[in-house]
Protein backbone atom coordinates (compact mmCIF):
# COMPACT_ATOMS: atom_id res chain seq x y z
CA UNK A 1 0.00 0.00 0.00
CA UNK A 2 1.18 3.54 -0.74
CA UNK A 3 2.51 5.30 2.35
CA UNK A 4 1.43 8.81 1.37
CA UNK A 5 -1.92 9.50 -0.35
CA UNK A 6 -0.33 12.21 -2.49
CA UNK A 7 3.25 12.67 -3.68
CA UNK A 8 4.65 16.16 -4.26
CA UNK A 9 7.64 16.82 -6.48
CA UNK A 10 9.08 20.32 -6.51
CA UNK A 11 10.59 21.51 -9.78
CA UNK A 12 11.38 25.07 -8.81
CA UNK A 13 8.37 27.24 -9.58
CA UNK A 14 6.43 24.16 -10.77
CA UNK A 15 5.08 21.47 -8.46
CA UNK A 16 3.86 18.07 -9.62
CA UNK A 17 1.17 16.61 -7.35
CA UNK A 18 0.40 12.92 -7.84
CA UNK A 19 -2.56 10.98 -6.50
CA UNK A 20 -0.71 8.09 -4.91
CA UNK A 21 -3.12 5.23 -4.21
CA UNK A 22 -2.65 3.19 -7.39
CA UNK A 23 -3.58 -0.06 -5.64
CA UNK A 24 -7.05 1.46 -5.06
CA UNK A 25 -7.22 3.21 -8.45
CA UNK A 26 -6.61 6.44 -6.53
CA UNK A 27 -10.10 6.31 -5.04
CA UNK A 28 -10.87 9.11 -2.60
CA UNK A 29 -10.38 8.08 1.00
CA UNK A 30 -10.29 10.56 3.88
CA UNK A 31 -6.49 10.78 3.95
CA UNK A 32 -6.29 11.58 0.22
CA UNK A 33 -8.96 14.26 0.39
CA UNK A 34 -7.49 15.88 3.50
CA UNK A 35 -4.04 15.92 1.90
CA UNK A 36 -5.37 17.53 -1.27
CA UNK A 37 -7.36 20.08 0.72
CA UNK A 38 -4.36 21.02 2.87
CA UNK A 39 -2.14 21.29 -0.20
CA UNK A 40 -4.40 23.51 -2.31
CA UNK A 41 -5.36 25.73 0.63
CA UNK A 42 -1.69 26.29 1.48
CA UNK A 43 -0.93 27.41 -2.08
CA UNK A 44 -2.56 30.78 -1.38
CA UNK A 45 0.47 31.68 0.72
CA UNK A 46 3.08 29.87 -1.41
CA UNK A 47 3.55 32.28 -4.29
CA UNK A 48 6.99 30.82 -5.03
CA UNK A 49 5.01 27.97 -6.59
CA UNK A 50 3.62 29.42 -9.80
CA UNK A 51 2.09 26.42 -11.63
CA UNK A 52 0.76 23.05 -10.41
CA UNK A 53 0.58 19.86 -12.44
CA UNK A 54 -1.98 17.34 -11.13
CA UNK A 55 -1.54 13.69 -12.13
CA UNK A 56 -2.06 10.18 -10.81
CA UNK A 57 0.01 7.05 -10.34
CA UNK A 58 -1.09 3.78 -11.89
CA UNK A 59 -3.63 2.94 -14.57
CA UNK A 60 -6.47 5.16 -13.30
CA UNK A 61 -6.72 8.86 -12.57
CA UNK A 62 -9.32 8.46 -9.81
CA UNK A 63 -12.06 5.86 -9.52
CA UNK A 64 -14.26 8.05 -7.33
CA UNK A 65 -15.15 7.61 -3.67
CA UNK A 66 -13.55 4.88 -1.55
CA UNK A 67 -16.54 3.91 0.58
CA UNK A 68 -14.36 1.98 3.00
CA UNK A 69 -11.85 4.79 3.46
CA UNK A 70 -13.73 7.13 5.78
CA UNK A 71 -13.91 7.21 9.57
CA UNK A 72 -17.43 7.21 10.92
CA UNK A 73 -18.50 8.72 14.23
CA UNK A 74 -20.70 6.00 15.78
CA UNK A 75 -22.79 8.68 17.45
CA UNK A 76 -23.43 10.64 14.25
CA UNK A 77 -26.57 10.08 12.22
CA UNK A 78 -26.38 9.18 8.53
CA UNK A 79 -27.13 12.74 7.42
CA UNK A 80 -24.42 14.24 9.60
CA UNK A 81 -21.82 11.63 8.61
CA UNK A 82 -22.61 11.96 4.93
CA UNK A 83 -22.61 15.74 5.11
CA UNK A 84 -19.09 15.77 6.57
CA UNK A 85 -17.73 13.62 3.73
CA UNK A 86 -19.64 15.58 1.10
CA UNK A 87 -18.40 18.96 2.25
CA UNK A 88 -14.80 17.85 2.71
CA UNK A 89 -14.56 16.60 -0.89
CA UNK A 90 -16.38 19.63 -2.30
CA UNK A 91 -13.95 21.91 -0.46
CA UNK A 92 -11.07 20.44 -2.51
CA UNK A 93 -12.65 21.55 -5.80
CA UNK A 94 -13.29 24.99 -4.36
CA UNK A 95 -9.71 25.26 -3.09
CA UNK A 96 -8.42 24.37 -6.56
CA UNK A 97 -10.38 27.24 -8.07
CA UNK A 98 -9.36 29.70 -5.33
CA UNK A 99 -5.64 29.00 -5.36
CA UNK A 100 -3.82 31.60 -7.48
CA UNK A 101 -1.74 29.03 -9.39
CA UNK A 102 -2.99 27.54 -12.66
CA UNK A 103 -3.61 23.80 -12.32
CA UNK A 104 -2.73 21.63 -15.32
CA UNK A 105 -4.28 18.16 -15.04
CA UNK A 106 -3.13 15.09 -16.95
CA UNK A 107 -5.28 11.98 -16.74
CA UNK A 108 -5.47 8.38 -17.86
CA UNK A 109 -7.94 5.55 -17.42
CA UNK A 110 -11.08 5.99 -15.32
CA UNK A 111 -11.92 9.38 -13.82
CA UNK A 112 -15.22 8.76 -12.09
CA UNK A 113 -17.40 10.86 -9.81
CA UNK A 114 -15.12 12.99 -7.68
CA UNK A 115 -12.22 12.12 -9.98
CA UNK A 116 -14.13 13.67 -12.87
CA UNK A 117 -14.69 16.78 -10.76
CA UNK A 118 -10.96 17.08 -9.99
CA UNK A 119 -10.41 17.39 -13.73
CA UNK A 120 -13.29 19.85 -14.15
CA UNK A 121 -11.85 22.05 -11.37
CA UNK A 122 -8.46 22.22 -13.10
CA UNK A 123 -7.56 25.01 -15.51
CA UNK A 124 -6.11 22.94 -18.35
CA UNK A 125 -6.60 19.23 -19.07
CA UNK A 126 -4.59 16.79 -21.18
CA UNK A 127 -5.91 13.26 -21.74
CA UNK A 128 -4.42 9.87 -22.48
CA UNK A 129 -6.30 7.95 -25.18
CA UNK A 130 -7.87 5.63 -22.60
CA UNK A 131 -9.30 8.38 -20.38
CA UNK A 132 -12.94 7.71 -19.50
CA UNK A 133 -14.87 10.21 -17.36
CA UNK A 134 -18.33 10.13 -15.86
CA UNK A 135 -20.53 11.66 -13.20
CA UNK A 136 -21.18 8.28 -11.66
CA UNK A 137 -23.53 9.43 -8.91
CA UNK A 138 -26.75 9.00 -10.88
CA UNK A 139 -25.83 5.36 -11.48
CA UNK A 140 -26.12 4.61 -7.75
CA UNK A 141 -29.50 6.18 -7.05
CA UNK A 142 -28.27 9.73 -6.46
CA UNK A 143 -28.47 12.84 -8.64
CA UNK A 144 -26.02 13.39 -11.46
CA UNK A 145 -25.08 16.84 -10.13
CA UNK A 146 -22.40 16.54 -7.49
CA UNK A 147 -18.93 17.82 -6.58
CA UNK A 148 -19.35 20.91 -8.76
CA UNK A 149 -20.25 19.01 -11.94
CA UNK A 150 -23.44 21.02 -12.48
CA UNK A 151 -21.41 24.23 -12.21
CA UNK A 152 -18.29 23.34 -14.15
CA UNK A 153 -19.47 21.07 -16.95
CA UNK A 154 -22.12 23.32 -18.62
CA UNK A 155 -19.65 26.21 -18.59
CA UNK A 156 -16.96 24.06 -20.18
CA UNK A 157 -18.93 22.15 -22.84
CA UNK A 158 -22.37 23.79 -23.03
CA UNK A 159 -25.73 22.78 -21.60
CA UNK A 160 -26.66 20.08 -24.13
CA UNK A 161 -23.50 18.01 -23.78
CA UNK A 162 -23.45 18.54 -20.01
CA UNK A 163 -27.07 17.41 -19.68
CA UNK A 164 -26.42 14.34 -21.84
CA UNK A 165 -23.71 13.11 -19.49
CA UNK A 166 -25.09 14.28 -16.14
CA UNK A 167 -28.55 12.85 -16.79
CA UNK A 168 -27.19 9.42 -17.73
CA UNK A 169 -23.88 8.94 -15.95
CA UNK A 170 -22.44 7.45 -19.12
CA UNK A 171 -18.73 7.66 -19.84
CA UNK A 172 -17.19 10.45 -21.92
CA UNK A 173 -14.21 9.23 -23.92
CA UNK A 174 -11.01 11.17 -24.52
CA UNK A 175 -11.96 11.74 -28.15
CA UNK A 176 -15.37 13.13 -27.20
CA UNK A 177 -13.78 15.34 -24.55
CA UNK A 178 -11.40 16.70 -27.18
CA UNK A 179 -14.22 17.29 -29.66
CA UNK A 180 -16.22 19.37 -27.16
CA UNK A 181 -13.23 21.28 -25.83
CA UNK A 182 -13.09 19.71 -22.37
CA UNK A 183 -9.46 18.67 -22.90
CA UNK A 184 -6.82 20.55 -24.85
CA UNK A 185 -5.14 17.53 -26.42
CA UNK A 186 -5.07 13.73 -26.37
CA UNK A 187 -1.49 12.43 -26.07
CA UNK A 188 0.13 9.04 -25.36
CA UNK A 189 0.60 8.04 -21.72
CA UNK A 190 4.33 8.64 -21.69
CA UNK A 191 3.89 12.13 -23.12
CA UNK A 192 1.32 13.37 -20.58
CA UNK A 193 3.72 14.74 -17.98
CA UNK A 194 6.19 16.24 -20.51
CA UNK A 195 3.23 17.93 -22.23
CA UNK A 196 2.04 19.48 -18.97
CA UNK A 197 5.53 20.53 -17.94
CA UNK A 198 6.08 22.16 -21.33
CA UNK A 199 2.93 24.24 -20.90
CA UNK A 200 3.93 25.09 -17.33
CA UNK A 201 7.28 26.37 -18.58
CA UNK A 202 5.46 28.59 -21.08
CA UNK A 203 3.38 29.99 -18.23
CA UNK A 204 6.57 30.77 -16.30
CA UNK A 205 7.58 33.14 -19.09
CA UNK A 206 4.79 35.48 -17.99
CA UNK A 207 4.89 37.96 -15.12
CA UNK A 208 3.95 36.23 -11.83
CA UNK A 209 1.21 38.64 -10.81
CA UNK A 210 -0.11 38.79 -14.36
CA UNK A 211 -0.46 35.00 -14.39
CA UNK A 212 -2.26 34.94 -11.04
CA UNK A 213 -4.64 37.73 -11.99
CA UNK A 214 -5.41 36.08 -15.32
CA UNK A 215 -6.69 32.99 -13.51
CA UNK A 216 -8.59 35.31 -11.17
CA UNK A 217 -10.27 37.14 -14.07
CA UNK A 218 -11.19 33.90 -15.81
CA UNK A 219 -12.81 32.66 -12.60
CA UNK A 220 -14.74 35.86 -12.01
CA UNK A 221 -15.77 36.66 -15.57
CA UNK A 222 -17.24 33.25 -16.30
CA UNK A 223 -20.01 34.42 -13.97
CA UNK A 224 -19.90 38.10 -14.91
CA UNK A 225 -23.28 39.80 -14.65
CA UNK A 226 -22.75 41.58 -17.96
CA UNK A 227 -20.22 42.39 -20.64
CA UNK A 228 -19.61 45.70 -18.85
CA UNK A 229 -18.66 43.90 -15.64
CA UNK A 230 -16.15 41.75 -17.53
CA UNK A 231 -14.58 44.72 -19.29
CA UNK A 232 -14.47 46.68 -16.05
CA UNK A 233 -12.50 43.95 -14.27
CA UNK A 234 -10.09 43.59 -17.18
CA UNK A 235 -9.54 47.35 -17.39
CA UNK A 236 -8.71 47.62 -13.70
CA UNK A 237 -6.38 44.66 -13.78
CA UNK A 238 -4.46 45.95 -16.78
CA UNK A 239 -3.97 49.45 -15.37
CA UNK A 240 -2.88 48.01 -12.03
CA UNK A 241 -0.42 45.59 -13.66
CA UNK A 242 0.99 48.33 -15.89
CA UNK A 243 2.25 50.10 -12.76
CA UNK A 244 4.30 47.14 -11.48
CA UNK A 245 8.08 46.86 -11.65
CA UNK A 246 7.66 43.69 -13.72
CA UNK A 247 5.74 45.63 -16.34
CA UNK A 248 8.61 48.12 -16.62
CA UNK A 249 11.07 45.20 -16.83
CA UNK A 250 9.00 43.60 -19.61
CA UNK A 251 9.16 46.77 -21.71
CA UNK A 252 12.90 47.16 -21.18
CA UNK A 253 13.52 43.48 -21.99
CA UNK A 254 11.45 43.78 -25.17
CA UNK A 255 13.60 46.59 -26.54
CA UNK A 256 16.80 44.90 -25.38
CA UNK A 257 15.66 41.67 -27.08
CA UNK A 258 16.12 39.47 -24.00
CA UNK A 259 13.85 37.48 -21.68
CA UNK A 260 12.45 39.49 -18.75
CA UNK A 261 13.83 38.87 -15.28
CA UNK A 262 10.70 38.74 -13.14
CA UNK A 263 10.83 39.96 -9.54
CA UNK A 264 7.11 39.68 -8.71
CA UNK A 265 7.07 43.34 -7.75
Image (tube, rainbow, N blue to C red):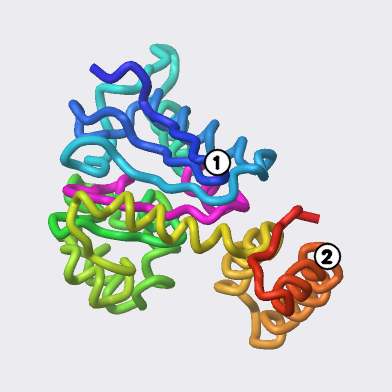
Q: Secondary structure at mark 1?
A: loop
In three-dimensional space, the C-alpha distance between marks 2 and 1, rounded to whole angstroms, equals: 23 Å
Q: Is residue 154 above or below residue 92?
A: below
Where is 170 relative to 35, above or below? below
- Check if residue 101 falls in the magenta segment: yes
Image position, residue 88 (x, y; %): 48, 35
The quarter of the image holding the N terminus is: top left
Which residue is the site of mark 2? 244
Instruction: Look at 53% across and 49% down and name the residue there.
Output: 94
Q: Which mark is residue 12?
A: 1
Q: Is residue 76 magenta?
A: no
Q: Position of residue 194 (x, y in %)?
A: 33, 52
Considering depth in this image, is 231 or 166 the residue closer to the camera?
231
Labels 2, 1: front one: 1
Q: Which mark is residue 195?
A: none
Position in image of residue 9 (x %, y %): 44, 34
Q: Which residues are magenta?
A: 91-115
Residue reaching furthest to the bottom? 227
Vertical placement of residue 225 versus 40, above or below = below
| Residue at the image position 75 percent from the left and 54 percent from the top | 264
CA neighbours of label 2 inside 10 A, class few (<14), some (14 to 19), many (20+): some
Say what secondary structure mark 2 lies in. Answer: loop
Do the residues bearing badges 2 and 1 touch, measured as CB atoms within 8 Å? no
* Picture coordinates of residue 32, whole percent (x, y): 38, 29
Side of 246 relative to 118 (left or right):
right
Residue 257 quadrant: bottom right
Amino acid sequence: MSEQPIAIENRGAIEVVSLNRPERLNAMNEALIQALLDYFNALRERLDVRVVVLRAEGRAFCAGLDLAGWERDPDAGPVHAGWRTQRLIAAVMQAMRKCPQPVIAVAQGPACGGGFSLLLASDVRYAAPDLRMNAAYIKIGLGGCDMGASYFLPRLVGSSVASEYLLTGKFMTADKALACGLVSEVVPHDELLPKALGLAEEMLQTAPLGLRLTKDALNLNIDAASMEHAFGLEDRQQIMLSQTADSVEARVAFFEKRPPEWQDR
